[in-house]
Amino acid sequence: VADRLSEFGLIAKYFVPLATHQGALSLSDDAAVLQEEAERDLIVTADALTAGVHFLPDDPPDLIASKALRVNLSDLAAKGAEPAGYLLALALPHSIDDAWLTEFARGLAGDQKEFGISLLGGDTTATPGPLTIAITALGHVPRSAMIRRSGAKPGDSVFVSGTVGDAGAGLAIRQGRRCEGADAAFLVARYRQPTPRLNLGLALRGVASASLDVSDGLIADLGHIAETSGVRIVVEANAIPRSPALCRFDPDVVRAATAGDDYEIAFTASRPMPSNLPANPNVTRIGHVEPGQGVVLIDGHGREIAVDKAGFAHF
Amino acid sequence: VADRLSEFGLIAKYFVPLATHQGALSLSDDAAVLQEEAERDLIVTADALTAGVHFLPDDPPDLIASKALRVNLSDLAAKGAEPAGYLLALALPHSIDDAWLTEFARGLAGDQKEFGISLLGGDTTATPGPLTIAITALGHVPRSAMIRRSGAKPGDSVFVSGTVGDAGAGLAIRQGRRCEGADAAFLVARYRQPTPRLNLGLALRGVASASLDVSDGLIADLGHIAETSGVRIVVEANAIPRSPALCRFDPDVVRAATAGDDYEIAFTASRPMPSNLPANPNVTRIGHVEPGQGVVLIDGHGREIAVDKAGFAHF
């Protein structure tokens, strides 16, 4: 790429076709422009992925692109926001070639169509280091409707969408742990390409008292809700939803509850089970909120299960 | 840093104090929230800087931070936008220590105060590669008031703010070219810490027919206006404003007109000189717009001066 395409050529070839929003101005200007609306809030979030840290350099480029976008859409989902668009800052090592970029752009195009969003802008630079993808995602909620982390109250129930621990198992398999066939394919796919729970997020507006997406691990992330809400969260280990594939691969519930990268939504609500949630993903009640602080995992007899490592830490 | 601070500890120590906007939620949530307004547009831009490409790894950390922020504010300025806040995605090599981060955060804090903005969110990761700073900046204009690149018309005059070529000379000095005393200090400072022309940008709303900031080089950037506007731009070499320090260091006007990193504003307007511009920075008329395409640089006799390299290219 270094020898064949200028920065502008690269943008024209791969990224201008992704700038479908009128306000992206076909990436031909210094900035994008979006009309604001009365009685609406802008929700904005940024997440960066680095090769070797957040994905494996030999992961398929379309899935790398998709994951980078989806982890940001997952944040919007957890806030009850409707996604509008994103900006992409890409630092490319010299090893990246046309074939790679073609697949990378194809991955973004597929997700743009699936989630109804557009590339709004960004920046492409060369780097002597690993591939880095920094995305800022923008979305909207009606005024004051963002679901925060800070609203959990004693007496609330605790829920999580989908299944937990699959992505961590998928990473372990990619790193050499033995698993084959359909189970391996399922678990690796859960690691490589999370599903942002956008429809669930919309349904949780006015329903969830607190919400976030599970990126660092279920226990660690519920810890963020406990801390910002000033409450204690009790999680029943037996209630944590796990996929059949995960149970066959690794029956350890603590590992499932502390593995990262699931991008499910964990939330609290005052009702034992909110009504009018979408049929997909499944939502499971996994515990309750008490006065106090921190997160505890309990077994079927109400005894606390020791958790050494509450979640993934980069440093 | 790797051994002493978690990602959360690092955010709490260095970045939460920068999240002064209420909607940043003290960086304790998945996203920031900003109230929208009727009859207003959101302007959004992203620029990333990589050590060794956009700044030198041993540049002072507070100035690295300031430059990363200011190149984004410069884009907002060129669009006539009032800055609101920014998101910061930081990829930190393991060599970065507390002293470095303290200075880096101090640089951001100073600029936040100077330009009235807040950190709204972001992401901090470790990288085996060079330091990378990806910033997304948000600003506002009244509905439809963004100054685009595409509005230049034949008969318009062409202007640039401040002086051109200083930053390129500053980089050459940092890379070993001989220059001493006050001239060297001035030129290096122009490279290390650009001045976003925000007041000028506000004054150009409804006045400039097209505008952008000069980051790749005056001729290259005017080429973007010529291309998106479908016009030809004629620049008079003798009119290009250059600082006394630059003229002493390097009298070559072509190098000044093709050096990057100045972050001045180049714009077109229908009047020979717009009135009611701020006193600072100085604005100079440097040419005019014709039917046709491309950019030409002419001497005092109207003869075209050959320009080999129109501006900086990363690839």
Image (spheres, coloured by chain):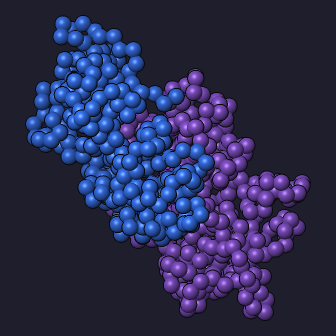
Chain colours: A purple, B blue
Position of B20 relative to B63 (above/below) = below
Position of A46 relative to A4 (above/below) = below
Position of A207 relative to B178 (above/below) = below
Residues B63 and B144: in front is: B63
Position of A41 relative to B64 (above/below) = below
Dividing the image into 4 quarters, which one contains the N terminus of chain B?
A: bottom right
Residues B180 and B245: in front is: B180
Report if residue B255 is visible in the image. yes
Q: Residue at x 75, y 91 (%)?
A: A303
Residue B208 shown left or right of residue A112 in the figure: left
Q: Position of residue B166 (x, y in %)?
A: 28, 31
Q: Position of residue A166 (x, y in %)?
A: 76, 64
Q: Residue at x 20, y 46 (%)?
A: B199
Q: Position of residue B203 (x, y in %)?
A: 18, 43
Residue B315 shown left or right of residue B298 in the figure: right
Count of all numbered marks drawn on residues in the image: 0
Q: Quadrant of residue A106?
A: top right
Report if residue A117 is visible in the image. no
Q: Residue at x 40, y 50 (%)?
A: B61
Q: Position of residue A37 (x, y in %)?
A: 36, 58
Q: Residue at x 15, y 35 (%)?
A: B282
Residues B225 and B188: in front is: B188
Residue B98 shown left or right of residue A35 in the figure: right
Q: Quadrant of residue A75?
A: bottom right
